[in-house]
Each structure stands twice: as structure tokens, then as C-alpha cells.
Image: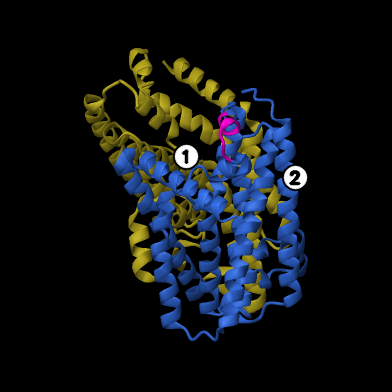
Chain colours: A blue, B yellow
Amino acid sequence: MVGSLKRYAQLLYLFTKFDFYLETAYGLNFLFATCGKIFRVLLVMVFFKTLVLRVPGIPQWNEAQLYILAATFYITDLIASILFHRNLLFHLPRIIRDGTFDRILTKPIPQLFHAAFNKIDVGDFLAFVPFMYFWIYIVQHFVLSVTFGSVALYVLLVVNAVVFIFALVLLLGSTSFWLNRGDGFGRLVDHATGAARFPFDIFPEKLKFVVFYILPVAVLATLPTQALLGFAQPLYILYSVGFTLILLAAALVVWNRGLHAYQSASS
Amino acid sequence: MIRVYWAIAKMSFQEYFAYRGNLYFELLGGLITTALSITLWYALFRISGQTEIHGYSLDVMIAYLLGVAFVEGALHIQNQGMKQMTDIHEGTLNNYLLRPFSPYLYWFTDDLARKILMCILSGMTVVCVAALFSLWIDFSFSVASLLLFFLSLCFAAVLHFLLFSLVVLSTFWIGISWGVTFVLRVAMGVATGALVPLSFFPDGIREVIFALPFKFFGYVPIQIALGQFTTQQTVWAFGQLCLWIVGVACVCRMVYRCGLKEYGAYGG
């Protein structure tokens, strides 16, 4: 168990190293891309500051809570983006289409691990720096009544959110074994999950039902934020964890079937 | 000569239509975001009990968001400038330099064809969302303001191409330029007024944003369509737009010439 964990950690380190070499082959481009990623986080902060400045009080969501919601969404998004999001949603369909997926099949590494983590986005690591500042800003400027338990639950629910995204993109990425599709589909998923940065509590009831229960993108940011602030419903926490596990199981089934259906024929 | 570029435009149309599913998915994604943004603002107006937020009534805000969705769909295409970058990076530019047309006009024609196609598809998407929310909106546009809107959109499309093209020309020196275009796209994500109207931003930031040309890719055309600009402001906006186009075109020409001297033609 420990041995295989160590091996996976070594592989992750190697993937990160190789990607870093590849990215920095064009040093200036890497620098600009990294600046762009940091800049994007700063602009998110400006956007939320503007929203809070111009829009009168939103029930249940004061300024600090809105910032926490935004920070939670982008932390989840960033972790997924560094580790597997692009690999499964954009890179996998491409290598299945052009037949280079064969290379993954022939290597002595579990295929799912290789497909999901073979490109670790090093530039995104640096985008964590402004996020840290964002959290420091929140802690310094607002009085938050959080407990050790609520912080622990928050961390667990962020992990749950990351697993939810992983399961979702694995499920959708795996459909590439049957469907020949381009990047547009991935962007559609990005748009749908991007909605999670909004405080869903204020939405009309029917839409709220959809985002909380049918396609529960509320688990990405709203739920962890509610847990941190102490107004999450225990039953909904159980539902979200259960939903994530079922989604993950379904994604793994589709992935395995996809592997069997793979024809190794490029288009 | 025009026949050559018409042929290029036709080829570009065919190329983009070959991956129709891809286009529709992209548009559907935009539709989801627009529908959610409208629902969010509707909810904000409803729960705050206000009839106006920073000078915007609900009708005007929804019309603004629909306008933004249309302009975004038509102009802000993913992978903007990628063809030009690949041609320079991989050395395909060699082929164009030997042919009887300008590579620059080739890239422009290709970009324009794609924008026209996206404009039509984006228009259809926005009509669908507008129909969905028609109960909440009182659409009232004058013919003149709509004509001016489309005219400003045409000018904005040219400036949009030129700005991206200018940063992509850095490929001649730095090898790959997607990082630079990424910075530009991120800046545009906020500074076009796509997320909130630019007048919502705090004073210092708003002044910086208004000094940049990105406002022409969202905020300005929509203000013209909504009739929020006076005649004087509209004339001034068009004047600025023309100055930006001429200025950026001159810089592009200069940088392209310098770039060609630097170009190794060996590919990346």
C-alpha cells in the first residue's frame, strides 16, 4: 500500500517535472501565461469587490461570505485545473481521436492515472499566491465565527468538490471513446460548472432544486462555504457525498467500458 | 484580387462547419452562462426590492446581458490568433509568402469569416434566451441605434483582430505566444464589461478600463444599442474606435515587417 502510494507520488513528481521542462522551453511564453493566471485571480477579486460595492445586501450572504464563496470556488477550480481537468476534458479526446492513446496503453502505469495526471499545470501553482492573499484579506477584514469542526468539515467538502469535478470530467471525457468531439464540449462543461461561483440560495426555487439536487454544482462552492459558516444542512452534506461517490463509480464504469471499446484507429 | 480572399473566406466557412457540433457546444455553453447571469440579476433585483441598481433597471440590465452574450459570442472566440501563431511557429508562413496574396490579409479574412459565422449563430442563441426571458423584458430599440450597434460591432471586430494579431506577432521573437494572448483574453474577460457594466467598477479601476480599447468589445456597442449614449458620446466613441484601429494597424504593420526580418522559416 505504502509502496504503491510512494510510486504514484514519484510519478506525479516526474509528470510535474517534465511538464515544467516542456513549458519553460519557451520561457517568455511561460512567464506571460503564469502572469495571466495570477492576473485572472486578481480580476476575480475586483469583480466580487465591485458586486458587493454596487449591489445592495443579499440575504444570507454578506461581503465576507461572498468572498469566501468566490475563494472556495476558485480553489476547487484551481486544484482541478492543476491536476486533471485539462487532461481528461481536452487532452484525452484529442489523443483518442488521433490514436496516440495507444502509448498510454503500452506503458506500465495504470491507464487512468496516466490519462488523468500526465500533464500537471505548473503555472497554475503560482496562482495560489494571490489566493493566499485573498484569504488573508478575508481573515484580517472580517470577523468570522468559525470553529475547528467547521474548518475540518470545510476541508473535507472541498476534497468532495474536487472528487466531484474529477468524476464529472472523467465521465464526460470517457465518452470520447465513442463520440468524436472537439474542445467545444469541454467548454460547455466549463460554463456549466462555472455557474457554481454564484450564491445559489438566492435563485428561484425550481432552479435551486436543479443546482442542489439534479446536477448538484452547489457542492463545488456553496456547500463548503455554508459548512464553514455553520449553516449547511447535515442531510444535504450526506446527499452531496453520496452523489459524488455514485458519480465516481459511474465514471469508472464508463471509463473501463471505454477502454474495451477503444479501437486504436485515428481519425 | 477580391476573388482570392472570397475563396479563402469560403474555405474558412467550410472548415468551421466541418466541426459543427463543436460550434454548437460552445454556443450552448454561452447560453447557459447568459441564462444564469440573467437569473442571478433577476434574483438580486427581486430580493433587494430595488427598481434600479446603479442606474440600471431590471429591463435594461437583462437587455445589457443579452447584448453582452451576443457580442461575446460573435467576437471572443476561443483560440483567437492560434492560426497565425501556428503559421509563424511551425513555418507554414513560408507557403503564404510564396503565394500571390498577403499573409496578413489571409489571417484577417479567415478571422472575419469565423466572426461572421459566430455572429449569426450567436444571434440565434441570444434570440432563444430572449424568448425564454421575454416575460421580464420590455425590448425597445430604435432602428438607428441598432444600425449604429452593428456598425460599431464591425469596427470592433477589426480592432479585435488587430489587437490579437499584434500580440501574436511576438511569436517571431518568443517562439510561442499563447501565454501573451492568454493575458489579453483574461484582461478582456473583465474590461469589456462582460461580467458587470463598466460603470459599476470603483472609480480608479473604471478610469483605467475606460482608457483601454477593450470597452469597444462589449460595453460601448451595447450602450449604443440601448440608447444610453448621447449623440456626442456616440460620435466620440466612433472617433476613438477609428483612431485605435488606425494606430494598432500601423503598429502591426511595423512589427510584422520587423518580424519578417527575424523570421527563420525553419519552423518550431
Q: Compared with residue B96, is residue A177 higher up or lower down, i.e. above or below?
A: below
* Mark drawn on residue B79: none
Most foreground residue, A124 or B50: A124
The chain ID associated with circle 2 is: A
Q: State which quarter of the image contains the C terminus of chain B.
A: top left
Q: Compared with residue A99, is residue B3 higher up or lower down, i.e. above or below?
A: above
Query: Residue at (64%, 63%) from the top-left corner?
Result: A160
Residue B67, position as x, y percentages in the image: 57, 52
Q: How many numbered discs, if any?
A: 2
| Residue B237 visible here | no
At label 2, which amino acid type do we have?
Val
Circle 2 residue = A253
Q: Compared with residue B67, is residue B42 higher up or lower down, i.e. above or below?
A: below
Evaluate whether label 2 is on the same chain as label 1.
Answer: no
Circle 1 residue = B154
Query: Residue at (46%, 71%) from the top-left corner?
Result: A49
Residue A167, position as x, y percentages in the image: 67, 52
Q: Secondary structure at mark 2?
A: helix
* Mark 2 Cα-neighbour bin, 10 Å: few <14, some 14–19, many ≥20: some
At label 1, which amino acid type do we have?
Cys
* Residue B79 among those drawn in magenta: no
Q: Nearer the viewer, mark 2 or mark 1?
A: 2
Q: Quadrant of residue B15?
A: top right
Residue B36, position as x, y percentages in the image: 65, 59
The magenta-colored residue range is A103-109
Most foreground residue, A241 or B167: A241
Most foreground residue, B240 or A179: A179
Query: Residue at (53%, 49%) from the top-left corner?
Result: A8
Q: Secondary structure at mark 1?
A: helix
Distance, label 2 to label 1, CA atoms, is 49 Å
